[in-house]
Amino acid sequence: MVKVLGVGYGVVGKRVADAVALQDDMEVCGVVDVAPTSLVAVANERKFPLYGTSPEAIAQMRKNGLKVEGTFSDILKDADIVVDTAPTGVTAKNVLLYEEARKPFIINGGEKHETTGFSFSSLANYREAVGIKKTRIVSCNTTAICRVLVALKSAGVMDDVYVNIVRRGADPVKTSSGPINAIIPVLGGFSHHAPDVKTVMPDIRISSAAVKVSSTLSHIHILKVTYKSPINKTALVEAFEKTPRIILVSGEKGITSNAHVLELFRDKLRPRNDMWEVAIWEDSISVEENTAVLIYCVHMEAIAVPENVDAIRAMLGIEKNPAIAISKTDKAMGLYQENANYDKL
Amino acid sequence: MVKVLGVGYGVVGKRVADAVALQDDMEVCGVVDVAPTSLVAVANERKFPLYGTSPEAIAQMRKNGLKVEGTFSDILKDADIVVDTAPTGVTAKNVLLYEEARKPFIINGGEKHETTGFSFSSLANYREAVGIKKTRIVSCNTTAICRVLVALKSAGVMDDVYVNIVRRGADPVKTSSGPINAIIPVLGGFSHHAPDVKTVMPDIRISSAAVKVSSTLSHIHILKVTYKSPINKTALVEAFEKTPRIILVSGEKGITSNAHVLELFRDKLRPRNDMWEVAIWEDSISVEENTAVLIYCVHMEAIAVPENVDAIRAMLGIEKNPAIAISKTDKAMGLYQENANYDKL
């Protein structure tokens, strides 16, 4: 059993811990946080050994009733690999500790590609990650775009991709953030998403732009793809059906907003109503000659969680074959798709 | 096994069906709906036999891939009791069918007290519901107020209660409803909540007012109670701790908004992140002489679900003792509180 240490028990960290705990070849040896909150106390309910970042943090956590085993440095030496989901800045300092302790580590979305020199997205570049010592899981938005591009690539030879990202204002509990009632354009050139995709899929011609809106539920992407020859909707729908971690929803069947998408995953009793898949509206797919446009929903809190699990297996060389690794993760977490072509990855 | 028919598979209906399915003395013999949507299709995933309201509805549901067993009238005759959560207006017509078929039935919040002549809230009046043929489960807001009043009553002799209700704008998927960015006062006299409480607890002196805001997460109540003699905070905290279906949360422990309350219940892996309890902010409780003020969070989608299960047991005479019935429901659903005084109900 590989011992995974989770550093950060926030939006992504708590989800990765749960996902790791579901696998039969790895376990959570500890989670590290600093906040003496009822949300971090959930780690105790899950029986994850909880560690504090400093004696002061631990004292405050214990004062608020949290059970804390010790400090970050106590547990780091026991870990086989670290998944860091701490805030940027904190992660930058943590990385030095992991390097010093010679521990393989994973950092997440908000961090820079240069920090690890490798950016990971399972469907696109699992094989390249086998045996590496450090990686960055790309952000929720980039993870979604990479998955969609893998599907789009399987349907024909792409010429150009352009994606508009309508970002949620903040995660649900980030109540100090706005906007309450405004649309905020991302200014100063193209948005960072297209260059971020290129850290994973360097050969794609892609550009992007983004706005931030008053929703805490999910991002929405509006993507335009141009192929080198005419394409048809059936081919695209089939490509999406055959690609793991992508699902189709439809307005005709009552899924008319991101609220409805998330409600569907509440009803499916997903933990925390998490949607790990990209949900593409089948009736948003419009095609004319070489060009297609589509709209999809990205659950920012959850989408990159399976990729964290895959990265652990790749980096430690537990499984070199992406089809086996990815389907194993999906089966353990409950998002395996019978009709998807895992073998083509 | 008592056969429960759910009429309406929307916000409340789907939750009641899940709650009934968890009990060892009742089962879901069917759920009835009209919508050919992916959300209603979840009834198929749950293996609840699904029925349509008309041949036309059934045809459309089947066209969209839903498995439908037959019509409402087919299954009504097999049911021992009906829980109706259909929209007001539809329920009014349905009630005539239940009366004609001589089936005991439960209607929910939005309906009028006069339709059944009895309004039910478990902690307050379970005993009176034993053996009755029809009842109304009071609304989410009234359910919350009744529970809080039961606790407040146990701490001293109340003189007067006043509650401000800050209502969520709409349930998450009701995307046609506002407000997006306004606060809407309820006009034309006191709000209906206080009179509604009196249908359950006629002896309480209570008044209420309400505003509607731009949130889809929960209601928030701000309640002021005056006792006939001085009260202290410790007595109130203890009363809340000892009352089933009430929990305490705290801003000091990081639960600083309704978003944080709901996040806690996502992290606890409650189905659909449902909070069946009333969550009172311990650090909102302010006391001066005879008067106390407190703030609490009401998850409108979920709070009255346990009451529906209790009502089935009361009406059919399965269990006459509220302590046994209510703790049985709570154990089966997973909200049983070890430290609460079920025996005092």
Image (cartoon, coloured by chain):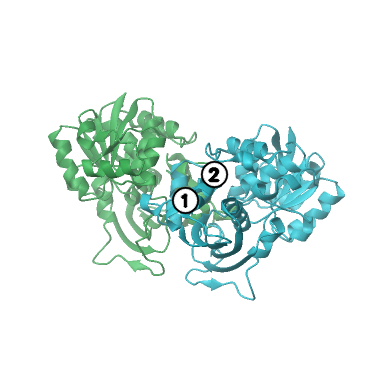
Chain colours: A green, B cyan
**Amino acid at circle 1:** Thr
Q: Which residue is mark 1?
A: B234
Please report, as a chain letter, where disc 2 is located.
B
Please state which of residues B277 and A15 is positioned toward the viewer in this rendering: B277
Q: Quadrant of residue B343?
A: top right
Residue A57, horizontal then vertical, whole percent: 25, 44
Disc number lying in front (1 or 2)? 1
Which residue ends up furthest to the left in the rendered image?
A100
User: In the figure, A288 relative to B304: above or below?
Assistant: below
Residue A273, horizontal then vertical, whole percent: 48, 45
Left/right placement of residue B41 relative to residue A98 reads right
Binning the other alpha carbons within 10 Å of mark 1 as few (below 14), some (14 to 19) or many (20 upward) gives: few
Q: Secondary structure at mark 1?
A: helix
Residue A240 visible within the image: no
Query: Which numbered marker is on residue B242?
Result: 2
Q: Quadrant of residue A302?
A: top left
Q: Secondary structure at mark 2?
A: helix
Task: Quarter of the image for the N terminus of chain B: give it.
Answer: top right
Left/right placement of residue B325 relative to residue B258 reads right
Left/right placement of residue B39 relative to residue A247 reads right
Q: Which tag, 1 or 2, sits closer to the chain's start?
A: 1
User: In the figure, A270 relative to B35: above or below?
Assistant: above
Please report, as a chain letter, where disc 1 is located.
B
Residue B4, horizontal then vertical, whole percent: 73, 40
Residue B35, horizontal then vertical, whole percent: 66, 52
Structural distance between the alpha carbons of marks 1 and 2: 12 Å
Please state which of residues A265 and B20 is positioned toward the viewer in this rendering: B20
